[in-house]
Amino acid sequence: MKRSTAGFTLVELLLVILCSSVVTMAAMSFLLMGMRMTGESNDTAQRQQTARIILAMVENLGGEIQSVTEDADWKITGTGGSELLAYSNAEKKLTAHGMTLIDGLEEATAAMNGQLLSFTLKTGKGSYKTSVYCRTAPPKQPESGETLDPAEEAAFLTTFRSRVAEAAAANAQAARSDPAGPAPAPAVTTPTERESRLALLNILAGQHGSGGEIQNQPADAPYRYFSEWYIGGYGAGKPGWNADTPWCACFVSWAAAQLGDAYLNTVPRFCSVDDGMERFQSGSIGTWHGRGYAPTPGDCIFFDWTGGSDPAHVGVVFYVDAPAGKVYTIEGNSSDRVAIRSYALDDPCILGYGELNWKQ
Protein backbone atom coordinates (compact mmCIF):
# COMPACT_ATOMS: atom_id res chain seq x y z
CA MET A 1 0.00 0.00 0.00
CA LYS A 2 1.27 3.45 -0.93
CA ARG A 3 2.11 5.64 2.09
CA SER A 4 0.34 8.99 2.30
CA THR A 5 2.60 12.07 2.53
CA ALA A 6 -0.20 14.42 3.46
CA GLY A 7 0.61 14.23 7.25
CA PHE A 8 1.29 12.05 10.31
CA THR A 9 -0.90 9.18 11.27
CA LEU A 10 -2.34 9.34 14.80
CA VAL A 11 0.17 6.73 16.06
CA GLU A 12 3.11 8.64 14.61
CA LEU A 13 1.89 11.89 16.19
CA LEU A 14 1.61 10.29 19.59
CA LEU A 15 5.16 8.91 19.29
CA VAL A 16 6.54 12.37 18.40
CA ILE A 17 4.76 13.98 21.37
CA LEU A 18 6.06 11.28 23.75
CA CYS A 19 9.67 11.65 22.56
CA SER A 20 9.48 15.41 22.85
CA SER A 21 8.19 15.12 26.42
CA VAL A 22 11.01 12.78 27.41
CA VAL A 23 13.63 15.12 25.94
CA THR A 24 12.05 18.13 27.65
CA MET A 25 11.89 16.40 31.03
CA ALA A 26 15.50 15.27 30.74
CA ALA A 27 16.59 18.79 29.89
CA MET A 28 14.67 20.22 32.82
CA SER A 29 16.19 17.61 35.16
CA PHE A 30 19.69 18.51 34.05
CA LEU A 31 18.89 22.22 34.45
CA LEU A 32 17.50 21.75 37.97
CA MET A 33 20.46 19.59 38.95
CA GLY A 34 22.83 22.24 37.67
CA MET A 35 20.97 24.94 39.60
CA ARG A 36 21.10 22.84 42.78
CA MET A 37 24.82 22.18 42.37
CA THR A 38 25.44 25.84 41.70
CA GLY A 39 23.42 26.77 44.81
CA GLU A 40 25.36 24.32 46.98
CA SER A 41 28.62 25.59 45.56
CA ASN A 42 27.66 29.19 46.24
CA ASP A 43 26.53 28.27 49.76
CA THR A 44 29.83 26.49 50.47
CA ALA A 45 31.90 29.33 49.06
CA GLN A 46 29.89 31.90 51.00
CA ARG A 47 30.30 29.99 54.27
CA GLN A 48 34.01 29.51 53.66
CA GLN A 49 34.44 33.21 52.93
CA THR A 50 32.37 34.21 55.98
CA ALA A 51 34.35 31.85 58.23
CA ARG A 52 37.65 33.28 57.00
CA ILE A 53 36.42 36.83 57.55
CA ILE A 54 35.36 35.93 61.11
CA LEU A 55 38.76 34.36 61.82
CA ALA A 56 40.51 37.48 60.55
CA MET A 57 38.20 39.62 62.68
CA VAL A 58 39.07 37.58 65.80
CA GLU A 59 42.77 38.01 65.09
CA ASN A 60 42.36 41.75 64.65
CA LEU A 61 40.35 41.97 67.88
CA GLY A 62 43.22 40.47 69.89
CA GLY A 63 44.10 43.83 71.39
CA GLU A 64 40.55 44.37 72.66
CA ILE A 65 39.73 40.92 74.04
CA GLN A 66 39.54 40.81 77.83
CA SER A 67 37.81 37.53 78.66
CA VAL A 68 35.97 34.47 77.34
CA THR A 69 33.14 32.61 79.09
CA GLU A 70 33.83 28.97 78.21
CA ASP A 71 30.35 27.40 78.31
CA ALA A 72 28.19 25.71 75.65
CA ASP A 73 26.83 29.19 75.01
CA TRP A 74 29.97 31.33 75.18
CA LYS A 75 30.88 34.93 74.53
CA ILE A 76 34.05 36.96 74.00
CA THR A 77 34.12 40.20 75.97
CA GLY A 78 36.16 43.27 75.10
CA THR A 79 37.41 46.29 76.97
CA GLY A 80 34.72 48.00 78.98
CA GLY A 81 32.66 44.81 79.12
CA SER A 82 31.38 45.05 75.53
CA GLU A 83 30.29 41.81 73.88
CA LEU A 84 32.43 41.17 70.78
CA LEU A 85 31.25 37.69 69.77
CA ALA A 86 28.68 35.28 71.16
CA TYR A 87 27.71 31.71 70.24
CA SER A 88 24.33 30.06 70.80
CA ASN A 89 24.68 26.29 70.98
CA ALA A 90 20.92 25.82 70.72
CA GLU A 91 20.59 27.98 67.61
CA LYS A 92 24.01 26.99 66.22
CA LYS A 93 24.83 30.53 65.24
CA LEU A 94 27.51 33.13 65.91
CA THR A 95 26.57 36.75 66.54
CA ALA A 96 28.40 40.05 66.99
CA HIS A 97 26.70 42.83 68.96
CA GLY A 98 23.43 40.92 68.50
CA MET A 99 23.71 40.58 64.70
CA THR A 100 24.02 37.12 63.12
CA LEU A 101 27.36 36.54 61.40
CA ILE A 102 26.95 32.90 60.46
CA ASP A 103 24.34 30.24 61.23
CA GLY A 104 23.93 26.54 60.54
CA LEU A 105 27.16 25.76 62.38
CA GLU A 106 27.98 22.29 63.61
CA GLU A 107 30.23 23.65 66.33
CA ALA A 108 31.99 26.80 67.51
CA THR A 109 34.47 26.95 70.39
CA ALA A 110 36.49 29.69 72.08
CA ALA A 111 38.90 28.94 74.92
CA MET A 112 41.46 31.05 76.75
CA ASN A 113 44.70 29.48 77.98
CA GLY A 114 46.34 32.25 79.94
CA GLN A 115 46.06 35.04 77.38
CA LEU A 116 46.09 32.81 74.28
CA LEU A 117 42.66 32.53 72.64
CA SER A 118 41.99 29.39 70.56
CA PHE A 119 38.99 29.85 68.25
CA THR A 120 37.28 27.21 66.06
CA LEU A 121 34.36 27.23 63.62
CA LYS A 122 33.02 24.01 62.13
CA THR A 123 30.52 23.82 59.29
CA GLY A 124 29.36 20.84 57.26
CA LYS A 125 32.00 21.72 54.67
CA GLY A 126 35.06 22.32 56.84
CA SER A 127 36.71 23.36 60.08
CA TYR A 128 38.38 26.73 60.58
CA LYS A 129 40.81 27.50 63.43
CA THR A 130 42.98 30.32 64.67
CA SER A 131 44.90 31.30 67.79
CA VAL A 132 45.69 34.82 68.91
CA TYR A 133 47.49 36.29 71.90
CA CYS A 134 45.13 38.78 73.50
CA ARG A 135 47.03 42.03 73.92
CA THR A 136 44.58 43.51 76.35
CA ALA A 137 44.59 47.17 77.19
CA PRO A 138 46.42 48.14 80.39
CA PRO A 139 44.10 47.43 83.32
CA LYS A 140 42.21 50.35 84.69
CA GLN A 141 43.85 51.62 87.85
CA PRO A 142 41.61 51.81 90.92
CA GLU A 143 40.53 55.22 92.12
CA SER A 144 41.80 54.40 95.61
CA GLY A 145 45.37 53.95 94.37
CA GLU A 146 47.59 56.98 93.90
CA THR A 147 50.21 57.66 91.26
CA LEU A 148 53.13 59.63 92.64
CA ASP A 149 54.09 62.73 90.69
CA PRO A 150 57.59 62.76 89.10
CA ALA A 151 59.14 64.78 91.96
CA GLU A 152 57.72 62.41 94.57
CA GLU A 153 58.93 59.37 92.65
CA ALA A 154 62.42 60.86 92.27
CA ALA A 155 62.64 61.63 95.99
CA PHE A 156 61.38 58.18 96.87
CA LEU A 157 64.01 56.50 94.67
CA THR A 158 66.80 58.72 96.05
CA THR A 159 65.86 57.75 99.60
CA PHE A 160 65.71 54.08 98.64
CA ARG A 161 69.12 54.12 96.96
CA SER A 162 70.59 55.87 99.99
CA ARG A 163 69.28 53.04 102.17
CA VAL A 164 70.81 50.45 99.83
CA ALA A 165 74.17 52.25 99.98
CA GLU A 166 73.98 52.54 103.78
CA ALA A 167 73.22 48.84 104.12
CA ALA A 168 76.16 47.91 101.88
CA ALA A 169 78.50 50.22 103.83
CA ALA A 170 77.32 48.79 107.16
CA ASN A 171 77.96 45.25 105.93
CA ALA A 172 81.43 46.21 104.74
CA GLN A 173 82.22 47.95 108.03
CA ALA A 174 81.07 44.91 110.03
CA ALA A 175 83.39 42.71 108.00
CA ARG A 176 86.38 45.04 108.59
CA SER A 177 85.80 45.36 112.34
CA ASP A 178 85.55 41.66 113.07
CA PRO A 179 87.73 41.27 116.20
CA ALA A 180 88.62 37.73 115.24
CA GLY A 181 90.38 39.04 112.17
CA PRO A 182 89.80 38.00 108.58
CA ALA A 183 88.51 34.48 108.13
CA PRO A 184 88.71 32.27 105.05
CA ALA A 185 85.78 32.87 102.73
CA PRO A 186 83.23 30.04 102.82
CA ALA A 187 82.76 27.96 99.70
CA VAL A 188 79.29 29.43 99.18
CA THR A 189 78.14 32.77 100.55
CA THR A 190 74.38 33.03 100.91
CA PRO A 191 73.02 36.58 101.23
CA THR A 192 70.61 37.32 104.03
CA GLU A 193 66.95 37.56 103.12
CA ARG A 194 67.07 41.31 103.73
CA GLU A 195 69.98 41.66 101.30
CA SER A 196 68.12 39.55 98.74
CA ARG A 197 65.00 41.67 98.99
CA LEU A 198 67.02 44.88 98.66
CA ALA A 199 68.81 43.46 95.62
CA LEU A 200 65.46 42.71 93.93
CA LEU A 201 64.12 46.19 94.67
CA ASN A 202 67.34 47.75 93.37
CA ILE A 203 66.96 45.90 90.06
CA LEU A 204 63.34 47.00 89.76
CA ALA A 205 64.18 50.60 90.65
CA GLY A 206 66.82 50.63 87.91
CA GLN A 207 64.00 50.25 85.37
CA HIS A 208 61.89 53.12 86.72
CA GLY A 209 60.25 55.07 83.91
CA SER A 210 60.71 52.32 81.32
CA GLY A 211 57.89 51.98 78.80
CA GLY A 212 58.44 48.24 78.43
CA GLU A 213 62.04 48.35 77.21
CA ILE A 214 64.86 46.88 79.30
CA GLN A 215 66.96 49.88 80.29
CA ASN A 216 70.75 50.00 80.69
CA GLN A 217 71.22 47.25 78.15
CA PRO A 218 74.40 46.96 76.05
CA ALA A 219 74.00 47.85 72.37
CA ASP A 220 74.36 44.20 71.30
CA ALA A 221 71.87 42.85 73.86
CA PRO A 222 69.65 40.11 72.35
CA TYR A 223 66.42 41.50 73.85
CA ARG A 224 64.81 44.90 73.87
CA TYR A 225 61.53 44.42 75.75
CA PHE A 226 60.62 42.53 78.93
CA SER A 227 58.06 40.50 76.96
CA GLU A 228 60.69 39.76 74.30
CA TRP A 229 63.02 38.46 77.02
CA TYR A 230 60.23 36.21 78.29
CA ILE A 231 59.44 34.47 74.98
CA GLY A 232 62.95 34.52 73.55
CA GLY A 233 62.19 36.88 70.67
CA TYR A 234 59.24 37.70 68.46
CA GLY A 235 58.36 35.71 65.39
CA ALA A 236 55.74 33.93 63.31
CA GLY A 237 55.52 31.13 65.86
CA LYS A 238 54.47 33.55 68.60
CA PRO A 239 51.22 35.14 67.33
CA GLY A 240 50.27 38.42 68.90
CA TRP A 241 53.47 38.96 70.90
CA ASN A 242 55.05 42.33 70.28
CA ALA A 243 56.04 45.51 72.08
CA ASP A 244 52.42 46.08 73.15
CA THR A 245 52.05 42.72 74.94
CA PRO A 246 50.95 43.19 78.58
CA TRP A 247 54.21 42.95 80.49
CA CYS A 248 53.61 43.49 84.22
CA ALA A 249 54.29 39.79 84.99
CA CYS A 250 57.16 39.62 82.49
CA PHE A 251 58.75 42.58 84.33
CA VAL A 252 58.57 40.80 87.70
CA SER A 253 59.88 37.54 86.18
CA TRP A 254 62.75 39.36 84.46
CA ALA A 255 63.84 41.04 87.71
CA ALA A 256 63.74 37.72 89.59
CA ALA A 257 65.81 36.10 86.85
CA GLN A 258 68.49 38.78 87.32
CA LEU A 259 68.81 37.60 90.94
CA GLY A 260 68.85 33.96 89.93
CA ASP A 261 69.45 30.99 92.19
CA ALA A 262 72.15 32.81 94.16
CA TYR A 263 69.31 34.59 95.98
CA LEU A 264 66.28 32.39 95.35
CA ASN A 265 65.60 28.71 95.92
CA THR A 266 62.98 28.92 93.17
CA VAL A 267 63.17 31.59 90.46
CA PRO A 268 59.60 32.50 89.43
CA ARG A 269 58.81 32.77 85.74
CA PHE A 270 55.30 33.62 84.54
CA CYS A 271 53.68 35.96 82.01
CA SER A 272 50.06 35.34 83.04
CA VAL A 273 48.97 37.01 86.27
CA ASP A 274 46.52 34.15 86.88
CA ASP A 275 49.30 31.59 86.48
CA GLY A 276 51.59 33.51 88.83
CA MET A 277 48.99 33.68 91.58
CA GLU A 278 48.08 30.00 91.18
CA ARG A 279 51.74 29.00 91.47
CA PHE A 280 52.16 31.01 94.67
CA GLN A 281 48.99 29.42 96.03
CA SER A 282 50.28 25.93 95.17
CA GLY A 283 53.61 26.70 96.85
CA SER A 284 55.68 25.96 93.73
CA ILE A 285 57.37 29.40 93.60
CA GLY A 286 56.83 30.72 97.11
CA THR A 287 54.13 31.29 99.73
CA TRP A 288 50.71 32.87 99.19
CA HIS A 289 49.26 35.38 101.66
CA GLY A 290 45.71 36.64 101.23
CA ARG A 291 44.11 39.94 102.13
CA GLY A 292 44.99 41.17 105.63
CA TYR A 293 48.63 40.04 105.46
CA ALA A 294 51.28 42.56 106.60
CA PRO A 295 53.54 42.74 103.52
CA THR A 296 57.32 43.10 103.41
CA PRO A 297 59.22 44.98 100.69
CA GLY A 298 60.15 42.49 98.00
CA ASP A 299 56.82 40.59 98.15
CA CYS A 300 54.82 40.33 94.93
CA ILE A 301 51.45 42.08 95.15
CA PHE A 302 48.43 41.00 93.09
CA PHE A 303 45.42 43.15 92.20
CA ASP A 304 41.86 42.62 91.04
CA TRP A 305 40.52 46.05 90.09
CA THR A 306 36.95 44.90 90.73
CA GLY A 307 37.73 43.85 94.30
CA GLY A 308 36.99 40.22 93.43
CA SER A 309 39.22 37.16 93.15
CA ASP A 310 40.35 37.30 89.50
CA PRO A 311 43.90 38.74 89.30
CA ALA A 312 44.45 41.44 86.68
CA HIS A 313 47.83 42.96 87.58
CA VAL A 314 50.99 42.27 89.57
CA GLY A 315 53.74 44.43 91.03
CA VAL A 316 56.24 44.30 93.90
CA VAL A 317 55.95 45.85 97.36
CA PHE A 318 58.50 48.68 97.53
CA TYR A 319 57.86 50.25 100.93
CA VAL A 320 55.32 49.83 103.72
CA ASP A 321 54.21 52.83 105.78
CA ALA A 322 52.31 50.94 108.47
CA PRO A 323 51.47 54.01 110.65
CA ALA A 324 49.88 55.71 107.64
CA GLY A 325 48.23 52.45 106.51
CA LYS A 326 49.88 52.61 103.08
CA VAL A 327 51.84 50.28 100.84
CA TYR A 328 54.06 51.63 98.06
CA THR A 329 54.63 49.46 95.01
CA ILE A 330 56.79 49.38 91.92
CA GLU A 331 54.89 48.03 88.91
CA GLY A 332 55.52 47.38 85.24
CA ASN A 333 52.88 48.31 82.68
CA SER A 334 51.25 50.76 85.08
CA SER A 335 49.86 53.37 82.69
CA ASP A 336 52.33 51.91 80.16
CA ARG A 337 55.48 52.39 82.24
CA VAL A 338 57.41 51.26 85.31
CA ALA A 339 55.90 53.42 88.04
CA ILE A 340 55.71 53.75 91.80
CA ARG A 341 52.19 53.79 93.24
CA SER A 342 50.63 53.80 96.67
CA TYR A 343 47.53 52.07 98.03
CA ALA A 344 45.77 51.82 101.35
CA LEU A 345 46.78 48.57 103.02
CA ASP A 346 43.11 47.63 103.25
CA ASP A 347 42.35 48.56 99.63
CA PRO A 348 39.83 45.95 98.38
CA CYS A 349 41.64 45.86 95.03
CA ILE A 350 44.63 44.18 96.68
CA LEU A 351 43.95 40.49 96.19
CA GLY A 352 46.96 39.14 98.07
CA TYR A 353 50.73 38.75 98.17
CA GLY A 354 53.27 36.23 96.93
CA GLU A 355 56.33 35.78 99.15
CA LEU A 356 59.27 34.52 97.12
CA ASN A 357 61.24 31.44 98.13
CA TRP A 358 64.34 33.29 99.39
CA LYS A 359 67.56 31.54 100.26
CA GLN A 360 68.30 31.69 103.98
Image (spheres, rainbow, N blue to C red):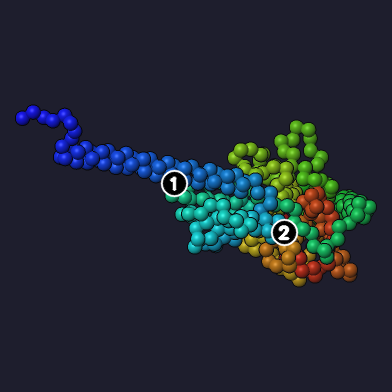
Residue furthest to the left in view is 1
Residue assigned mark 2 = 80
Crowding around mark 2 (Cα neighbors within 10 Å: few <14, some 14 to 19, many 20+) is few
Residue assigned mark 1 = 125
Q: Quadrant of residue 25?
A: top left
Percent coordinates x, y for residue 95 in the rendering: 58, 56
Which residue is at a point 80% across and 70% down the rendered structure image? 346
In the depicted structure, whether residue 281 falls above or below residue 34: below
Q: Quadrant of residue 218?
A: top right
Q: Examine the rendering and report whether any part of residue 182 can be seen.
A: no
Percent coordinates x, y for residue 58 in the rendering: 61, 48
Between marks 2 and 1, how big is the CA–CA gap? 36 Å
Percent coordinates x, y for residue 60 in the rendering: 65, 45
Percent coordinates x, y for residue 6 in the rendering: 18, 31
| Observer-nearest of 194 and 318 | 318
Q: Earlier in the sequence, mark 2 or mark 1?
A: 2
Is residue 248 toward the left or the right of residue 325 in the image? Answer: left
Which residue is at a point 5% across and 30% down the rendered structure image? 1
- The quadrant of the picture occupied by the C terminus is bottom right
- Label 1: element kind: loop
- Label 2: element kind: helix
Q: How many marks?
A: 2
| Observer-nearest of 45 and 1 | 1
- Residue type at mark 2 is Gly
- Residue type at mark 1 is Lys
